[in-house]
Amino acid sequence: MKKTLSWWLILALLVIVAFVGLFIPTGLGEQDFSNIDTGDTAWMLTATGLVLLMTPGLAFFYGGMAQPRNIISTMLQSFIAMGIVSVLWVVVGFSIAFGESIGPDGFGLFGNPFTYFMFKGVGGGTHPDFAPTFPFAIFAMFQLKFAIITPALITGSFAGRVRFRAYMLFMVLFIVFIYAPLAHWTWHPNGFLRNWGVLDFAGGTVVHMSAGFAALAGAIFLGRRKDASKEFKPANIPYILLGAGMLWFGWFGFNAGSALAADAVAATALVNTNTASAAAMLTWIFFDAAQGRKPSAVGASIGLVVGLVAITPAAGFVNIGSSVFIGVIAAIVSNYSITLRSKSRLDDTLDVFPAHGMGGIVGMLATAVFANEVGLIHGEITTFLYHLLALVIVGIFTFGGSMLMYKITDMIVPMRISPHGEKIGLDMSQHNESYNIAYSNENS
C-alpha cells in the first residue's frame, strides 16, 4: 500500500506540472530571426540528435557489462533519464544552468529558476550569448542531452543494488543541486569558473568529472554487493561493442556540436575526438597485452570510451598531436586505476570513477597543458593553476554534494535494495521482467 501511494504521489506531481505549464505565458516577446544561419541551425539540430543517441548507447554499454539478472534494470536506468531529465530541464533545470545569474558580477553561482521557467522565453529566435546564429530553443535542447547522460553515467557505480524509485529521486536532486549549478559555473558568461579562464569545451568537468565523483560517492554510500567478491563475466559482450560504437558515433555531436557553429572549430573538435578515441583504444589493448592479458573486446570498448572522455574538455582547444597524447595517457591512467580499484574494497560495479572520473581529470589537466595560446606548454601558468583549483573545488562539490543527495534520498526512499531483491536481481525484483536467455543460463 505504501509503495502504491508513493507512485500515486509522483503521478500527481507530474499532472500538476502539466497543468501549471498550461498557464505559463510563453513570454517570447520580440525575437531576433535576422541572424539565423541555416548551416549552423542544421548542424546543431544534427548534433542534438547525435548526443541523445549516446544515452541509449550507454544503456547497451552498461547493460552488456552487468550481470544477466540486472541487464534490463541497468539499461532502464539510462533510458528513464531521458524522460525525467527532459521534463525537469523544461520546468527548471535549464533556467538554473543558463538563467539570469545569481551572485556577484563575474562570480555567478546559479541561474534564476524563473528566468526560463517552463521554457518561458525559449523560442525560435537567436540569443546573443548562447545561440547567436541558430534558434535558442535548439541550444536549450542541445544542453538537455548533456544533462540526460550525466546521471545515467553514475548508475554504473551502483548497478545491481539500487532501488528504482530512489534512483529517480536522486536523479532529480542531482540535476537541480549539482549538475545545473556546475554548468552555470562553467558555461554561463557570469560563471566564476568560466571567468577564471577554466576551459571545458564539451563537458569534461561538467559531465564526466561530476559523474565520476558522484559515482564514487554512490559506491561508498550504498556499500558492496553481497557477491562483490565473486568474479563475474559480462552478460553480453556484443551489447558492449554496440554501445561503445553508438557512444563513439554520438560523441561527434557531443564535442563538435559544442563549437555551436558549423565551422573550423567544429571540424577540429571532430578530428581530435576521433583521433584521441582511436589512440586510447589501441593503447588499452597494447597495455593489457604487455601485462600478459589477452586483447579483448571489452578492453577495446572501455579504452575508446576513456579516450572520448579525456578529449572532451580539450576537443576544440588543442591540435591533433595533443589529442593523440591525451588519448594514450588517459588510457594508461584509467587502466591502472581499474586495476587498483579491483584490489580495494570499493565496489564501483562498472568502474565509473576509474574510467569517467579519472578520464575527466586527465582531460581537464591536459587541456590546461596543451590549450592553444594559453596552455602550459606555451609558457602560460595561470590557466593550469586555475584548472588545479577548479579540480579541487569541483571534486569537493560533486563528491560532497552527491553524498548529501544520497543521504536525503535514503531518508525518503531507502536506496539499497533488499538482500532478497539483490539475489534474484533487479530485473525481477524492481520491474518483474527478465532477460530470458541470459537469466536462464545464469540460473541453469
Image: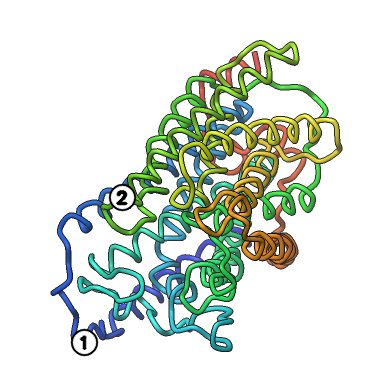
Q: Is residue 362 above or below residue 442?
A: below
- Tell which of 208 and 389 is nearer to you: 389
The C terminus lies in which quarter of the figure?
top right
Of mark 2 and mark 1, the one earlier in the sequence is 1
Left or right of residue 155, residue 338 in this image? right
Tag 1 residue: 29
Nearer to me, 278 or 144: 278
Contact between marks 2 and 1 (CB within 8 A): the answer is no
Left or right for 358, reference 118:
right
Please determine whether, in this image, residue 133 is positioned above or below residue 156.
Answer: below
Q: Amino acid at mark 2?
A: Ala
Q: Is residue 376 left or right of residue 129?
A: right
Q: Secondary structure at mark 1?
A: loop
Residue 1 seen in the figure: no
Quadrant for the N terminus, please. Answer: bottom right
- Is residue 13 placed above or below 364 in the rendered structure? below
On the question of residue 339 being in view, the answer is yes
Q: CA distance from mark 2 to mark 1?
A: 33 Å
Q: Position of residue 55 (x, y in %)?
A: 45, 44
| Viewer-proximal residue among 119 and 428 | 119
Residue behind mark 2: 264
